Image (cartoon, rainbow, N blue to C red):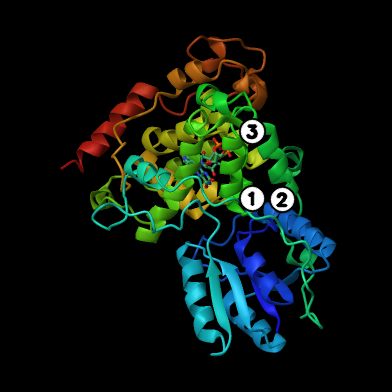
Amino acid sequence: KSQILWLRRDLRLADQAALIAAAKAGPVIPVYVLDDEMPKHRKMGGASRWWLHHSLTSLGTALADKGSRLILRRGNSAEIIADIAKEAGAAAVHALHHYEPWWRNAEKALRKALPGDVALDLHHGNYLMPPGSVTAGSGGPYKIYTPFWRALDQHMPPAVPQPAPDSIDAPDSWPASDHLDDWQLLPARPNWATGFAEMWTPGEAGAEANLEAFASKAVRYDERRNFPSEVGTSLLSPHLHFGEISPATVWHRIIAEHGAEAAETYLKELVWRDYSQNVICQYPVYGSENARDRFDAFPWRDMSDPTVQADYRAWTKGRTGYPIVDAGMRELWATGWMHNRVRMITASFLIKHLLIDWREGEKWFWDTLVDADYGSNSTNWQWTAGTGVDSNMFVRIMAPLTQSEKFDTAGYIRQWVPELADLDAPYIHDPEEHGFRPKNYPRKIIAHKQARQRALDAYAAIKE
Ligand code: FAD
């Protein structure tokens, strides 16, 4: 009897527990459903859709090489998977566990929709440890990262990654499939994604290439990861998000090269990804609600006010007059990615300098990042805002100019803000202050001191 392989954010053949189990049990029908019936604004954003198109193309080719096929459908995932299982007379549906609230709901709905004799087998493998399984001594889940890391590390290394099956048996007949191009996942006109293609190769091979390029550099990560003009990080986030590579594969490759101790800073960073899933398992509404209730009364500026809208637009377009913020926002628009240090600076700027609710920023990142991830995005935004389950960071107001001088030592601003390309340090970090602001570059949207005071005053209004 055939086996359905329900694919979501696990678009790979290697170390894919659901595929391995399905292929062992019988002929496999791999299915990807584009499910746009998500809660409001959780529908995949534009940058993610670009990635998805290319990742599915790559997966389709890899499956064809193994004698299989990728079936594409659009609509309600639970209903569609159940229909295909019935039509094919399948024995089971295999999938990897997913933890976004809508995927957990879809898993429940699928269980209900499947005939009694068709099993839903959910496997682990998109995280180092199954989210929710790393618990404190009291048995409850962790809220804070450091004890979470310590507890998770006790279980490392993860199981050795499994290779892709040598061959995948095909069923006697294939269900109907959509044509990927009909889904129109790519931008029409203007094509805002030309820079994406220069930077990324979505799919399993692209993920492996980035891991290989980074592996030898992982020991220098601690020292180099904060400098945005360098390629000092692994550039694996969209590949990990779409499940084109398993975190166990990354872990083993890095420790094979350096050992766990030498590469600890990197491995710890990888664990933030697990941590964020652990958080959304506990707080499924983390992307839309403050974890600290008292922030519900925070006097954010009003988004219906045209001045606030203009400030927000300036932030999205990289025209705030703060070069490091503008460089980051333009890098994001051009490549679908932004360096982590600059994500922290730009997020802090929106929340504290512009006093705009973190959820507006989270939404923008959701739409524009190729690695947009419900767990990681909401955890990092709530962390920056101080609204989250971990420490309250609100009063840590990053000074963008100091950050810029410290971390942009080699031309990040010059690369992304061409209006300033002729300026050298220190002028390039703050051209207005030094009297070198070119006419086509905006004045600072707000002075740092004034913004800082406004943020602290706003915070005082809700302080216990
Ligand atoms: P590396 O530094 O090489 O790290 C390796 C991997 O570890 C990453 O690929 C990622 O999977 C994981 N990781 C690293 N840092 C974090 C972190 N702070 N939180 C969670 N996982 C982490 N990351 C996303 O994957 N998706 C998001 O939607 C996302 N939104 C963010 C929003 C804000 C405001 C901030 C400050 C950070 C956000 N991050 C997000 C985390 C981080 O910026 C990216 O994971 C990282 O920049 C990706 O680049 P890399 O693969 O080269 O990372």
Q: As shown in the figure, which amino acid type bears the numbered disc 2?
A: Glu
- Residue 303 percent location from the top left of the image: 41, 49
Q: As shown in the figure, which amino acid type bears the numbered disc 3?
A: Ala
Element marked by disc 2: helix
- Residue 152 percent location from the top left of the image: 40, 47
- Residue 374 lies, with reference to residue 231, above or below; the image says below
Q: Residue at x 23, y 55 (%)?
A: 138
Mark drawn on residue 215: 3
Element marked by disc 1: loop
> Around disc 1, counting alpha carbons within 10 Å, would you say few (fewer than 14), some (14 to 19), or many (20 or more)?
many
- Residue 424 percent location from the top left of the image: 61, 10
> Around disc 3, counting alpha carbons within 10 Å, would you say few (fewer than 14), some (14 to 19), or many (20 or more)?
some
Q: CA distance from mark 3 to mark 2?
A: 16 Å
Mark drawn on residue 245: 1
Q: Is residue 180 visible?
A: yes
Question: How many numbered marks does the figure carry?
Answer: 3
Q: Are marks 1 and 3 in contact (CB under 8 Å)?
A: no
Mark drawn on residue 204: 2
Q: Residue at x 51, y 27 (%)?
A: 262
Q: Earlier in the sequence, mark 3 or mark 2?
A: 2
Element marked by disc 3: helix
Would residue 169 be found to the left or right of residue 39 on screen? right
